[in-house]
């Protein structure tokens, strides 16, 4: 697959272009530096709640503008998963999401040659906007999976905070996969994740998408679910569809037909996504700083979500029951099966804002 590397590099210069985008690509998993949210902002209020609401689970609003009720926590440890960055308190999600993650971790060990998954951010206890790292992950239907396999031992809480990310990209090269870290198991893992009907799409680095387009020789039916996006070079982002019958959940537009190895991918290998914004005209007024998101900017129901009664404890709201909160769990029993059965296929993209990096105004419509 040829995407015009030579033309792009002749225009900008290979080293200059690679250097300009390198920091943004590598920073995709860490999150851009952001100022502390103002008291009263949606980020501050939702980030300050430590437990989910009582009552039934429901995603409210859109992936990048919403909240949720009745969230459950992924157990910190399971037979084939470990939750990371525990201090963030972002391992909460809709039960359908948590059930899918547990099932996926087991299937990955069984079918993809993957020893177990490391799970990053899912959502805050009541969803809503986060103070750092994400524009989406607000309604409990998004989850980050590291591209680092789970170690054979249980990591300590300190190790889970400090373990560095491993990028799949070569340093000082433009969108190039590092053959020293990329394996066939990575490819099988991604295609397994895309195979579940309740998975809406999976965000990956453009270089990873291209690698899959160039090398995947198996069934390509679900390859189109892999969507190129800024960052995402050391983790991939699973997004689930809105559960059926939930009127308050706003879906995305359908993914375009095909495997996605087309002009929408080729665009990422041109200068356009990486070009700096045009400087303002000398006589132009300086732009106003972006206004912080307030609770009033979210769906109306989110104000009530903040005020709703909390569950008794984190243990009580851990998926699989209180016993699952204390250690390795095989909680993927009847409750998991029923939760998964509640999410049959319906296809839906409006694109999320990137975790980091520039936001182009000429992004292809087929994203």
Image (tube, rainbow, N blue to C red):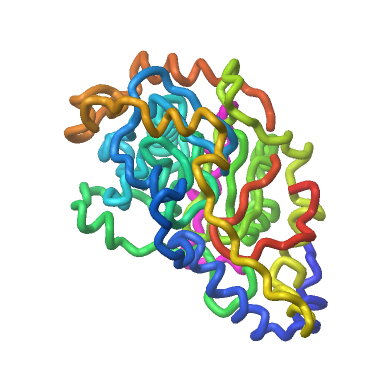
- Observer able to see residue 192: no
Residue at 68 percent of width and 75 percent of height: 286
Specify the quadrant that holds the N terminus. bottom right
Residue at 44 percent of width and 19 percent of height: 339
Any magenta on residue 184? yes
**Residue 253 relative to residue 35: left or right:** right
**Residue 189 relative to residue 330: left or right:** right
Above-or-below relation of 10 to 320: below
Question: Measured from the top left, where is residue 95 in percent x and y?
Answer: 41, 25
Which quarter of the figure has residue 102?
Answer: top left
Which quarter of the figure has residue 243?
Answer: top right
**Residue 134 relative to residue 329: left or right:** right
Question: Measured from the top left, where is residue 72 in percent x and y?
Answer: 35, 29
Question: Measured from the top left, where is residue 279 in percent x and y?
Answer: 74, 79
Residue at 48 percent of width and 65 percent of height: 32
Above-or-below relation of 166 to 96: below
Residue at 81 percent of width and 55 percent of height: 263
Q: Quick one: 194 or 186, which is closer to the camera? A: 194
Which quarter of the figure has residue 196?
Answer: top right
Above-or-below relation of 99 to 149: above
Any magenta on residue 266? no
Above-or-below relation of 15 to 61: below
Q: How many marks?
A: 0
- Observer able to see residue 291: yes
Question: In the image, which residues are magenta?
Answer: 176-199
């Amino acid at each position: 697959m040829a995407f015009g590397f030579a033309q792009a590099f002749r225009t900008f210069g290979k080293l200059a272009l690679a250097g300009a985008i390198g920091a943004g690509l590598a920073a995709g998993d860490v999150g851009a530096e952001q100022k502390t949210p103002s008291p009263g902002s949606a980020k501050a209020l939702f980030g300050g709640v430590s437990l989910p609401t009582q009552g039934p689970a429901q995603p409210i609003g859109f992936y990048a503008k919403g909240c949720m009720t009745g969230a459950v926590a992924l157990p910190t440890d399971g037979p084939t998963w470990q939750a990371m960055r525990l201090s963030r308190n972002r391992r909460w999600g809709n039960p359908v999401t948590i059930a899918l993650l547990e099932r996926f971790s087991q299937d990955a060990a069984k079918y993809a040659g993957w020893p177990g998954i490391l799970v990053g951010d899912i959502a805050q206890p009541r969803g809503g906007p986060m103070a750092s790292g994400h524009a989406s992950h607000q309604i409990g239907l998004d989850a980050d999976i590291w591209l680092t396999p789970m170690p054979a031992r249980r990591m300590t809480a300190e190790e889970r905070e400090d373990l560095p990310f491993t990028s799949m990209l070569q340093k000082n090269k433009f969108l190039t996969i590092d053959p020293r870290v990329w394996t066939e198991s990575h490819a099988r893992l991604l295609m397994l994740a895309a195979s579940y009907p309740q998975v809406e799409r999976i965000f990956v680095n453009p270089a990873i998408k291209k690698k899959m387009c160039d090398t995947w020789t198996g069934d390509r039916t679900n390859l189109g679910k892999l969507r190129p996006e800024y960052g995402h070079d050391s983790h991939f982002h699973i997004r689930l569809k809105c559960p059926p019958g939930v009127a308050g959940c706003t879906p995305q537009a359908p993914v375009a037909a095909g495997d996605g190895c087309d002009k929408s991918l080729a665009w990422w290998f041109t200068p356009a996504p990486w070009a700096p914004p045009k400087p303002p005209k000398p006589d132009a007024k300086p732009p106003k700083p972006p206004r912080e998101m307030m609770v009033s900017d979210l769906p109306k129901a989110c104000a009530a979500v903040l005020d709703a009664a909390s569950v008794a404890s984190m243990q009580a709201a851990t998926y699989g029951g209180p016993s699952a909160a204390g250690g390795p769990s095989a909680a993927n029993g009847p409750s998991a099966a029923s939760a998964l059965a509640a999410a049959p296929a319906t296809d839906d993209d409006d694109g999320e804002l990137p975790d980091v990096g520039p936001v182009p105004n000429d992004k292809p419509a087929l994203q």
